[in-house]
Structures are given as structure tokens and as C-alpha cells.
Image (cartoon, grey):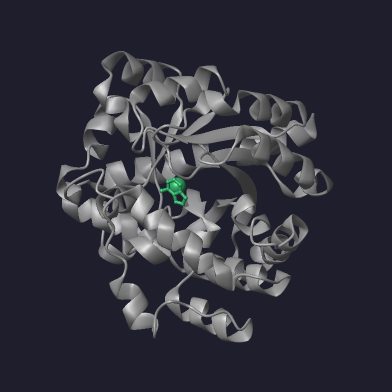
Amino acid sequence: MSEAGSVSLPKAELHVHIEGTLEPELAFALARRNAVELPFPDTEALRRAYLFEDLQSFLDLYYRLMAVLRTEDDFAELADAYLERAAAQGVRHAEIFFDPQAHTARGVPIGTVIEGLARALDASERRHGVSTRLIMCFLRDESAESALRTLEEAKPYLRRITAVGLDSAEVGHPPSKFREVYEAAGALGLRKVAHAGEEGPPSYITEALDVLGVERVDHGLRCMEDEALVERLARERIPLTLCPLSNVRLRAIGVLEDHPLPRMMDAGLLCTVNSDDPAYFGGYVGDTFHAVREALALDEERLRELARNSFLASFLEDDEERRAR
Ligand code: ADE
Ligand code: ZN
């Protein structure tokens, strides 16, 4: 498959944080519009700051830059820009994370965030040929009570939201901390995913499955340290939303050539490849397909398997089946 072929292969993106698609140019445009001061003189200086030690050093900048997002229009513009780029890289369906607490903590109402995103998502099939779902994430380094309050605040907007997720600083914040809010989300008919095993241990993956009842694990990279867990994930066909460029930029993996993706596929895991925070990590999902193809010598069949898996692991078909019932 040519470079253009791997980039344009029809695929679904299942792991992308909308706030992580904020490109420096848009950040500066929004900063001007909203009279927000950024701690960088220009886009180049900002890009030079994209050298991360680990997840926390990235999150510090990621949360800081969000200060420019204030109005419904800002969120709509952010999401529309992502969908346009994603469509150009073969994405036909996108399940998009957002972090409401990162905005409500700054005084931006949750309705502003959701209505703004929803405006872009509602127009996406027509404008970009990309179907969408929205996944509301709880920040795991905030309290369980804050997550419960957020779920409560989201109640007027639930028809916009397909699933809940769990993100932010992982180590020290195990999935079990959020048992109650996941139970409540399930009772409201929301589906469940969670980041686990990105920097945290394999036991966090097991907890996400057994305590939170997730259907899909975001990252799940460190499952490779536990053979029995790998066997279970393969047997139960639990999808993993891997983000190889993110793993290198956040130093979970030294170089892309050492990424365990081929071994994970050989072990029978249902792997998907995603961009995570593409504005920060050097590529959208088509670029990621191209990068793993080159670095890991994946052949055409493997790339097609990854693209097929992305649709299989999506909420698309089940949702339609559920609606038909
Ligand atoms: N929020 C945005 N990107 C994230 C990541 N890679 N891990 C955890 N939380 C995040
Ligand atoms: Zn993520």
C-alpha cells in the first residue's frame, strides 16, 4: 500500500481528545478573539514547548492552553477543524472525547461546551462525510464527587452523549475510585470506556473491566506485562484503542520501532490505532497509520485489519441495533 493509500484507507477514530486537536494557529486566533494572554510569544515558540517528559508534563500544557476556549463558537470551530482534517485522512467515523471539568473549572458552563461541540458534530456527516459520537470523560485526578457532579450537570444533554470515559493523570488514580459514577452512568444508558494501562499498571486494566464494566480499553499498552491478561483480552475480544505516536511523545515507548503493536496483533488482541492528541503528538490518524507502517513494517493485510478493527470496535453498529430494538 502506498503512503497515500495508508493515509486515506477508510477508518474510524476511537481515541481522540477534542482539546488535543487544538493547533497552535487556532489557539492564538482564539486567544486574540477572547483577549486571553498565552505564555508564548508566537506559534513557533509554542511548538518548541512540545517536548514532553511524561504524561503529566504534557497535561500541564494541554490544560493551560484550553484557557482560550470560552464560547460555543470556539468549541464548534475546534471540532469542525478536527473533523475536516480527519476526513482528509480517511476517517469516516469519529468517537470524540471531551473533558467537561477542564472547562467548568474555568467558569465555562457544560452546556456551552456540549452545544458548541454538538453543532460541529451535527453538521459533520453533511460537511465532511464523517459520522460521530461524543464521549464525556471524567478527570481521574479530580475527586469521585466532582465526577458525580459533572454527570449530574450533563443530564440535560444526555442525548448528545454516547459514553463516559476516564482520562488525565493515571498513576495513583485507579479505576475503582470511579465505581459509583460509572454505575450511575450505566443506569442512564451511557456506554463505558476508560483509559487504563497507559502509564498505570496492568491491574488498572483489570479494574476498568471488572469494577467499571468498560467495553473498550483506551491505550491498554501495559497489558503486555501480564500474559494472563493478554489472553483474557484476546479471548473476550476487548478492543484496545492504541495511540503509538502518543506513546513515543510521552515516553511510554523509547522509539516507534519498539512499539509492541505487531506483537499485540500476533497475540490476537483487537487493536486499533488512533491519534490521542494529534495537535501535540505530530500526526492525525492517517499520519499514524503511515508512521506505524514504516516503523513496524506492517504489510497491507495488517493495515486493513487495523482499519477493519476500528469499525468493529466502534459504537456504530451496536447503537443502530439498539435503536432498532
Ligand atoms: N488527556 C488527553 N490526553 C490524554 C492521555 N494521553 N492520557 C490521559 N489523559 C489524557
Ligand atoms: Zn487519551
Residue 3, given in percent of the width and then of the height, sits at: 27, 64
Q: Is residue 56 above or below residue 71?
A: above
- Does any portion of residue 9 appear in the rendered image? no
Residue in the picture at 54% in, 39% down: 166
| Foreground of the two, 303 or 156 | 156
Picture quadrant where residue 34 is located: bottom right
Residue 181, given in percent of the width and then of the height, sits at: 67, 30
| Foreground of the two, 110 or 256 | 110
Indicate the quadrant containing the N terminus: top left, top right, bottom left or bottom right.
bottom left
Total count of labels: 0
Residue in the picture at 35% in, 28% down: 269
- Does any portion of residue 216 appear in the rendered image? yes
Residue 255, given in percent of the width and then of the height, sits at: 17, 50
Residue in the picture at 78% in, 40% down: 152
Indicate the quadrant containing the C terminus: top left, top right, bottom left or bottom right.
top right
Q: Is residue 8 above or below residue 137?
A: below
Residue 185 relative to residue 9: left or right:
right
Residue 60, given in percent of the width and then of the height, sits at: 42, 58
Picture quadrant where residue 115 is located: bottom right
Picture quadrant where residue 263 is located: top left
Q: Is residue 303 above or below residue 192?
A: below
Residue extending furthest top? 228
Q: Is residue 126 above or below residue 189?
A: below
Residue in the picture at 44% in, 38% down: 309
Residue 251 relative to residue 323: left or right:
left
Residue 76 relative to residue 325: left or right:
left
